Image: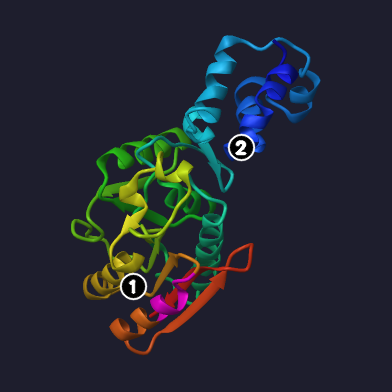
Amino acid sequence: MTLKEYLKSIDSYIKNENREYEAIKLLLIEKYYHSVANFYLKMDDEISNEMIIDLNKYIIDFIPVQYILGYSYFYNLKLKVNSNTLIPRNETEILVELAINKIKENYLTKKNKDFKKVLDICTGSGAIALAIKNNINVTVKGSDISKDALDVARENAEKLNLDVEFIESDVLEKVDYNCELIVSNPPYISYNEEVSELVLNNEPHLALFTEEDGLYFYKKIINDAIKKIKTLKMIIFEIGYLQGEKIKKIATEICGNVDVEIIKDYSGKDRIVVITL
C-alpha cells in the first residue's frame, strides 16, 4: 500500500474522530521523510509496517505525536518529552521571550547588576529553564515535585550541554536560592474544567490540574516566594486565559502595592502575568 492510498483509506476516520492531518504529517516528516518536499514526493511509494504502527498510535490510540517521537521542539531546542512531562506549547515561548527581555533590561543594561538568577518552578521537562539559559548567560535553576519529570529535565540539560540545576521540591519547600526572577507555568486547570481527549488521556494530571479553580499554585508561589526569597524582584507566570484579573487581585492582596501586567498570547487571550515587586 502506498502512502497516498493509506491516507485516503483513513480519511473519513480522521475527520470523524477529530484527528489532525497536520499531526500525521509531522510524525511522518520527522521520523521518515525528513522534509516537506520529500513527504509529497514519496506519496506513491510503499509504506512499511513500522510506519503504519506509528500512525495507528496517533490515529487509533490517539497518543500525541511528540510522545510517539519522544521529543518536541521549543524555542529552538529539541527536548525529550514523555508521559511524565507536559508537551511544551507555543504560547509558553511568550513567557521565555519576556523573561529574557526583562533580564536584559535589568541586568545587561546595568539598571540592576544583581538581576541574574532565575528559578523555574514546576519545570517539567525543563523547557523554560533551558530555553532561558540557552539564550542569556544567567544562573538558572528549576524545581518540580515530580522525580520522573526531573529525570527528563536533567537528561535534556545534559544533551544540550546547558548548566541548569534541577531540584526535587514542592514549590519552594526544598529550594534554597536567592534569585531575582521566578518564572513558572504551574498547573492551572480546575478539576471541573473540560480539556481535550488528547491531553486528558496522555499528559500528566499532576502538571495540569489543581485546586481552588486553578489558582492554588499562583497563591502558593507568590506567598511562599515573598516570605522566603528576600532578593526577589519579579515573578512571571503563564496563566489560563480567564485567570489574569484573579491573579492580579491575589498578588495585590498578598504583596500590597505591586505592579501587575497582564500580557496576551498570539490569539489575543490573557496568557502571561508579570508581577514586579
Residue 171 image-quadrant placement: bottom left
Amino acid at circle 1: Leu
Determine which quarter of the picture holds residue 35: top right
Left or right: 227, with 111 as reference point: left
Around disc 1, counting alpha carbons within 10 Å, would you say few (fewer than 14), some (14 to 19), or many (20 or more)? many
Q: Label 1 belongs to which residue?
A: 232
Q: Residue at x 62, y 10 (%)?
A: 48
Expressed as whole percent of the image width and height from the top left, the position of residue 241 reads 50, 67
The Cα atoms of the two marked residues, 2 and 1, are separated by: 50 Å
| Residue positioned 57% across, 48% down in the render | 75
* Residue 220 vertical placement versus 254 (above, below): above
- Pair 2/1: label in front: 2
Q: Mark 2 points at which residue?
A: 16
Secondary structure category for the residue under label 2: helix
Vertical comparison of 31 with 255: above or below: above
* Amino acid type of the residue that numbered disc 2 sits on in the rendered structure: Asn
Query: Which quarter of the image is occupied by the N terminus?
Result: top right
